[in-house]
Image: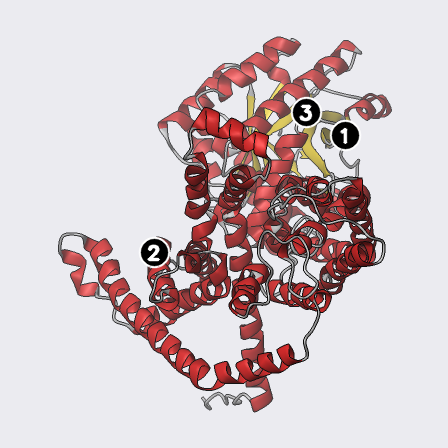
Amino acid sequence: MAPIAVTPRTGPARMAVWTQSLQQRLQLWLQAIREAYVALLPLTVFGVMANTVALIPYSPYVQWMTTHWGPGWQASTLRIFDATLGLMGLMAAMVIAARTTALSQAHDRRVERSTIAVAAVAASAFLLVVLRQPFDFQVLGYASALQSILVGVAVAELMRLLGRWLPKHTRMGGVDGGISLQNALHMTGTAALTLLALWLAHGLWQALFDGVLGPLLGRLWQGFLRQQPGGDVLNFGMVLLNQLLWMVGINGGQYLYAVSSASGLVASADVLYSSHLISPAFLNAFVHTGGAGATWGLIIYCITQGKDPSLRRLAWYSVLPAMLNMNELLLFGIPLVLSRTLLLPFIAAPLLSCLIATCAHTLLGMPLDGLRVIWSVPVFISGYVMTGGWSGVAVQALCLLSSTLVYAPFVRQLETRRIQRNRGYFKSALEVLMSTEFEAHADTLDRADSVGEVARCLVRDFQADLGSSRVTLAYQPQHDAQGRVVGVEALLRWTHATHGPIPTAALINVAEECELIHHIGTWVVQRACEDLAAWQKAGYSGFTVSVNMSPVQLHSTTWVQTVRDALRTHGIHSKDLDIEITEGRTLTNTAQADKTLAELQAMGLSLSMDDFGMGCTSLLYMHRFKVYAIKLDGVLTRNVLHNPVDQDIIRCVCRLGHSQGVHVVAEFVETTAQRDLLQALGCDFFQGWLYSPAMPADQIPAYLDAWHTATPTAPN
């Protein structure tokens, strides 16, 4: 045999592969950064609330707090701030490293590193980078936001790459500790090399900055200062740089104020407005309403005019933090960080607010002679306190209106893109959840990718809709060879508020991983018995109602009682209810499963095997329990006209069923020729669009009137 020629990849092809790989890593890093800051949001909110409580500039309030909580109440409250926001840089580095590692391992489908160990290494690396002499506590907070992002991602990636290169210590498997000791020894080497690499990289950067970049930036800064810019120009420059830094995930305010303060360009905290310096109090009150980017306008538009339900919910969740001028939930939830769609309004809205407030003060005489407020004081309150009247409130209201109008067209564009993207994600995830390769115990709900996110969404939203008009039962008739209706199968239907009809297979596959499958089973059997009771009361009888049961429910100690209660509540005879067990999932031979099947059969219920032909477990249950019917899987019946192998399989199954006195039901019957061949092969009952699609319960009586019902006849 001649050797197979392998065409080497060209340079452009290799570049395309490398570019695609880099894009995937960038997306993963951005997702990790966003999720890390969202995860830290509770600490952020708590820290801001503590800071606000400690620094409210209202004398009666301060006196009341001192009287009731003692003279040290402010220091105690600020310790909460130091323990939360004061450590945000350190905590962000740890969580970013942990999330990057978790997402990487989910993408690679293998667990190689402990996320806790990676987070610990990230903490050490962060301290190695930011600590200086003398020690300044602020370097552990938002002032080092950039370092936290870089360190978190770098530690995760270095430990990922080094971990695959270093030896695994597999010979340590026989000593005490086993695999845990192997991992510990392996992580020790990767941690040491990671810390060494970051220490060297930081040292090189520091030398480059001190020797080249620092003096260059200093000369540029001195040149700018010689131009003697006024306070208004500095304010606008501060706002612009702050927004640009936030767009890449850096807390611009903390960073810029630290740099500018060292140059003497920032007015003191007691100055509400300066004509020649940056005025933090003025910018916080009139520009950064809702947080960096004047995002109160974004929140207002999403709540009042937004069409995307997820964006609207996110906006509602952001209201409380926005009252304290915090918007991390929006920055990393939408996200605003690195968003091309919202880049322009994120910069333009605060600049326009700065222009409005500056004109109101310098041209229209808005007073700024009130009391000093801190940055977390809510909008309108800060305006009233700083101006000593309603003029500040009016200007803030105008700023909010202008920012809302600026965000409006861009949010509409964002919603359109999000809807298209989410539809794509949702569709591809549903295909995975319905695929034949889907594993019953794949821990889908714990997956960190879009499939896991959609799975969790399905569980959450279905639980909310269960019991509403969005969740219904449809019934598909089953006919015998003479065309008489011998039964109807109850089929679950769910119409999602956003995504429309959801395939039942996808929902059930996810529900079987949690308690939701038992809630579904209870609701279905109750509703099916209720509908059957209504039909029988109207005079329609002589047919059975089939209810699907997941094999997972066989392990429930309460399922038998659930069925018994449904029959008793609605006055249904057990012979009128058929329980179909799906073979697509593994039927385990546990004591509880055997007990459940035996008790169901002792009640007089019919037991049928659904999707017969997908596995071999049905044969075992036919051996151990009396089966009323077996339903051929659609994989066998759809192509029976053109596939001789399927014909042979169906013929064998029918012979087996008839020898045991079991009915054979063919599903997905769509043409007369298909039905006739299936009947010739030995099938007894037929179900499919040849007769009718599944229909609502209120249409069943009219359908029964059009067909004569009959008691099923025994197979030959």
Q: Which residue is mark 2?
A: 114
Residue nearest the viewer, comparing 152 with 361: 361
Where is residue 386, by image quadrant? top right
Up-down: is 549 above or below 165? above
Rendered residue at 49%/25% (across/down): 626
Q: Please name which of the two marks, 3 or 1, marks the residue nearer to the observer.
A: 3
Residue 615: percent from left, percent from top: 49, 45
Q: Are marks 1 and 2 in contact (CB under 8 Å)?
A: no
Where is residue 456, by image quadrant? top right
Q: Residues within 10 Å of mark 1 (few under 14, many from 20)?
A: few
Up-down: is 553 above or below 110? above
Rendered residue at 21%/64% (across/down): 170
Rendered residue at 63%/25% (across/down): 524
Mark 3 or mark 1: name the one nearer the start of the chain: 3
Q: Secondary structure at mark 3?
A: loop
Q: Which residue is mark 1?
A: 482
Q: Which mark is residue 467?
A: 3
Q: Residues within 10 Å of mark 2 (few under 14, many from 20)?
A: some
Mark 1 or mark 2: name the one nearer the start of the chain: 2
Residue 119: percent from left, percent from top: 37, 57
**Distance CA(mark 3)–CA(mark 2):** 42 Å
Residue 162: percent from left, percent from top: 34, 72
Residue nearest the viewer, comparing 671 with 354: 354
Q: Secondary structure at mark 1?
A: loop
Amino acid type, callout 3? Gly
Q: Residues within 10 Å of mark 3 (few under 14, many from 20)?
A: few
Mark 3 or mark 2: name the one nearer the start of the chain: 2
Up-down: is 610 above or below 413? above
Amino acid type, callout 1? Gln
Image side of residue 344 versus residue 90, left or right: right
Amino acid type, callout 2? Ser
